[in-house]
Image (cartoon, rainbow, N blue to C red):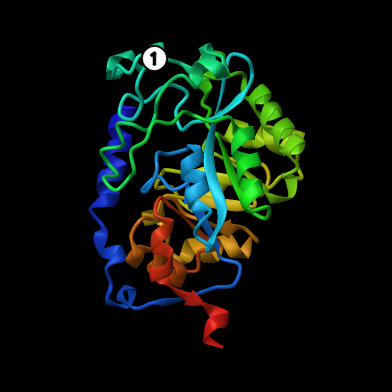
Amino acid sequence: MIKFAKAFFYFILSALPFLACKSTEKRPVAIPEGFDWEGHRGCRGLMPENTLPAFMHALTFPQVVTLELDLAVTKDKQLIVSHEPYFNSDICLKPSGDTIRKSEESQYLIYEMTAAEVQQFDCGSIGNPRFPDQQKQKVYKPLFRDVVLAAKEKRPDIHWNIEIKSQANWDGKRHPAVEDFAHLVIAEIQNLGIEKNAVVQSFDVRALKAMHEFAPQIPLAFLIENMESFESNMTRLDFTPAIYSPYYLTVTKKMADECHARNIKLIPWTVNEVPAMRRLIRLGVDGIITDYPNKIAEVGSKSSDKK
């Protein structure tokens, strides 16, 4: 029932393309100063997601302010950059080079492997059927630490949007207890010296509450994938997050106004078409998460360029 409801939610939203196709969205838009362009999983539309090549390529686009990524935890308590806590059969191969069947995914849990074992899997050679422009290459899931160190060499000022991928029924099975997960993330952020440039995001309210309790100085982003109102979703937290981050087709002017009235930034995910980016900027969003940072240049120009 949960899977059906989620599928229906996305079906309804995908049936609303007119939201991004008004005539005004054919015209370039003035991009506000300080706008937060975020490379989703690096640049998933162009390179294998959540890999060093994806993050390094995203940094070649000067408009990109933030690198967005997801974290999983290994058996030896290392933070691995991965959207799933297992090996996705659509994009990964076994160390032997054999394919992974969908039914086998639960046999290949990152939390049951060491970091060295995780990095024997190839998650780039077969590409991604959803992103035909993605460059195929043999590549592994990197350590979070290695991504940060490599990026800082190229762009010391780069910001980070770090997702804790957790849910209650995964505790102790696909990741440690959510409090322990939060402690691992906080420690690594501090060890890497990126505390002032990092945001931690999650769909899991438990993870956000743990982060707020253990490290209130680190800004948090509340990820949303439902059609409930802003006010309804905010009742799930007992504090005010720095960022409200919903699916982009749910964004309205009312939502933008509500966020800004509470001094919350509005940064939707994941926006891959230029007309939709323009529409959202006109609605008043503070940033955009995209798989295609190469499209940013088409959207418009900075407000200061028009002065």
- Viewed as shown, does residue 26 lie left or right of 223? left
Residue projecting furthest to the bottom? 307
Foreground residue among 176 and 231? 176
Residue drawn at (53%, 31%), measured in percent from left and top? 142
> Where residue 305 sits: x, y (%)?
54, 82
* Residue 41 visible in the current orientation: no
Callout 1: 10 Å neighbours few (<14), some, many (20+)?
few
Q: Indicate whether 250 appears above or below 84.
A: below
Count of numbered badges drawn on the protein: 1
- Viewed as shown, does residue 270 lie left or right of 133? right
- Viewed as shown, does residue 208 lie left or right of 276? right
Q: Indicate whether 215 appears above or below 106.
A: below
Q: Quadrant of residue 9?
A: top left
Quadrant where the N terminus lies? top left
Residue drawn at (53%, 22%), measured in percent from left and top? 168
> Where residue 44 sits: x, y (%)?
40, 45
* Residue 155 visible in the current orientation: yes
Quadrant where the C terminus lies? bottom right
Q: Secondary structure at mark 1?
A: helix
> Where residue 258 sits: x, y (%)?
55, 62
Residue projecting furthest to the left? 15
Residue occupied by mark 1: 106
Q: Quadrant of residue 298?
A: bottom left
- Viewed as shown, does residue 189 lie left or right of 291? right
